[in-house]
Amino acid sequence: MSPEFVIGFAKQSIELALTLALPMLLVGLVVGILVSILQAATQIQETTLTFVPKIVSMFLALLFAFPWIMEKLISFTRDVFINLPNYIR
């Protein structure tokens, strides 16, 4: 295994992890901004008000994105196992 291969494989793994986290992170960002705007407009400074909507919305985003996430993970894992003999050389 060459250093270029290891760096490329690590890069591909990190890109996959970031791609899989993107739907939940975007939903959390949008809901967080909306809750912050609501808090600023109403001057309600309740700390639990920021966490509960974000957690619920991120969980719902995970439920909707789960089939896509599993397809990506299975595809990546399949490629790793198929090319395992090439990696060992």
Image (spheres, grey):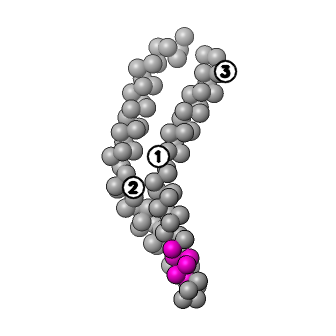
Q: Amino acid at mark 3?
A: Pro
Q: Secondary structure at mark 1?
A: helix
**Residue 84 placement, left or right of 5:** left
Contact check, label 3 and label 2, Cβ < 8 Å:
no
What residue span does the magenta drawing correspond to? 34-39
Q: Position of residue 16 (x, y in %)?
A: 50, 39
Q: Say which residue label 2 marks.
A: 62
Residue 3, picture quadrant? top right
* Residue 31, label in figure: none
Residue under the point 54% across and 10% down: 89
19 horizontally vs 62: left or right:
right
Label 2: few (<14), some (14–19) or many (≥20) C-alpha neighbours in 10 Å:
some
Q: How far apart are the two marked residues, 3 and 2, measured between alpha carbons?
A: 35 Å
Q: Residue at x 51, y 74 (%)?
A: 34
Towards the viewer: 26 or 69: 26
46 or 34, which lies in front? 34
Indicate the amino acid at tag 2.
Leu
Locate the N terminus and report the quarter of the image it occupies: top right
Q: Position of residue 83 (x, y in %)?
A: 45, 18
Residue 38 sits inside the magenta stretch:
yes
Where is residue 43 drawn, in percent x and y?
58, 88
Whether residue 36 is situated above or below residue 78 in the rendered picture:
below
> Taking the image as drawn, is residue 48 in sight?
no
> Tag 2 or tag 1, which sits nearer the N-term?
1
Residue that label 3 marks: 3
Earlier in the chain: of badge 1 and badge 3, it is 3
Q: Residue at x 55, y 82 (%)?
A: 39
Query: Residue 20 shows which numbered tag?
Result: 1
Q: Earlier in the sequence, mark 3 or mark 2?
A: 3
Residue drawn at (56%, 86%), measured in percent from left and top? Answer: 41
Q: Is residue 38 above or below residue 20?
A: below
